[in-house]
């Protein structure tokens, strides 16, 4: 059996000063780590280096990773299985309405219309497709393909929203953060685990 740690949306050092202390313990013993993007923008190389102390890392670039020398997508072969890896951000004409709905619903409704079909088209021969971007964990099998989002290491809490507002962000982020800081519930930071066996691949979500 091969165990693969899966992380996404660490946003470190962009928003997080350091990775959560629980992360090395949760991923201890994995053979490989896949990072589905939004590593952390400038300085994200240090985040990848820290993860590499746990296990070798394969990563892709997210929409917050300007300046990082990473591919937008890749296929990783593990024990004869093909794993497609991509962040999951699409065109602004899709992303901005989804962000608006997510904002006004205080994060309770965040449309991902068509994303799974888009992932399958992008990786038609993959056994597993790993993506991030939505900050929402998702595990489902579509035909012969396992589609897996590990959730996000970085989640916006009301305290985090207030801290980011002190940095005087642009109007769109400012509006979004004003709403998000009033949320009464927010997702738990999570990572994922893929276990590759002869008989197949299983996925699980691990809280931090």
Image (cartoon, rainbow, N blue to C red):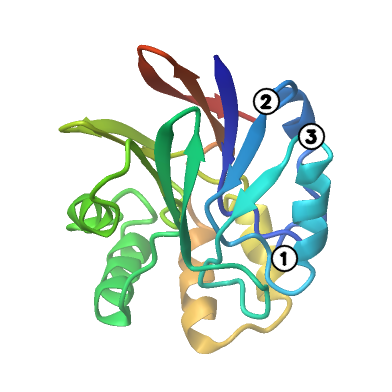
Task: Give the class, few, some or many, for how many residues have Cα within 10 Å of label 3's Cα (few <14, many ≥20).
Answer: some
User: Residue at the spot x=47%, y=77% of the render?
Assistant: 175
Residue beneath disc 2: 30
Residue beneath disc 1: 163
> Residue most toward the bottom?
170
Pick the quarter of the image with the N terminus: top right
Task: Give the class, few, some or many, for how many residues have Cα within 10 Å of label 2's Cα (few <14, many ≥20).
Answer: some
Nearest the viewer among 15 and 204 is 204
Q: What is the secondary structure assignment of the residue under circle 3?
A: loop
| Label located before the other in sequence (2 or 1) | 2
User: Residue at the spot x=52%, y=52% of the render?
Assistant: 36
| Residue 170, x across and y down, in percent | 57, 87
On screen, residue 113 versus residue 139, left or right, reads left
Alpha-carbon span between mark 3 and mark 2 = 8 Å
- Residue 51 sits above or below residue 139 on the image: below
Alpha-carbon span between mark 2 and mark 1 = 34 Å
User: Are circles 3 and 2 on residues that touch, CB within 8 Å?
Assistant: yes
Q: What is the secondary structure assignment of the residue under circle 1?
A: helix
| Residue 45, x across and y down, in percent | 78, 63
Residue beneath disc 3: 54
């Amino acid at each position: 059996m091969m165990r693969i740690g899966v992380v996404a949306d660490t946003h470190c050092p962009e928003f997080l000063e350091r990775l959560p202390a629980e992360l090395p313990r949760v991923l201890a013993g994995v053979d490989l780590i896949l990072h589905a993007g939004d590593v952390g923008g400038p300085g994200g190389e240090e985040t990848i280096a820290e993860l590499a102390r746990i296990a070798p890392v394969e990563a892709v670039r997210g929409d917050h990773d300007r300046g990082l020398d990473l591919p937008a997508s890749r296929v990783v072969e593990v024990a004869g299985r093909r794993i497609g890896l991509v962040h999951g951000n699409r065109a602004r004409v899709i992303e901005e309405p989804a962000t608006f709905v997510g904002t006004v619903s205080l994060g309770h409704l965040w449309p991902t219309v068509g994303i799974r079909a888009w992932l399958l088209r992008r990786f038609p021969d993959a056994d597993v497709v790993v993506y991030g971007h939505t900050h929402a964990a998702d595990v489902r099998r579509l035909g012969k393909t396992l589609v897996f989002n590990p959730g996000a290491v970085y989640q916006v809490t009301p305290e985090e929203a207030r801290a980011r507002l002190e940095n005087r962000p642009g109007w769109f982020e400012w509006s979004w953060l004003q709403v998000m800081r009033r949320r009464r519930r927010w997702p738990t930071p999570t990572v994922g685990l893929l276990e590759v066996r002869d008989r197949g691949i299983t996925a699980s979500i691990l809280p931090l």
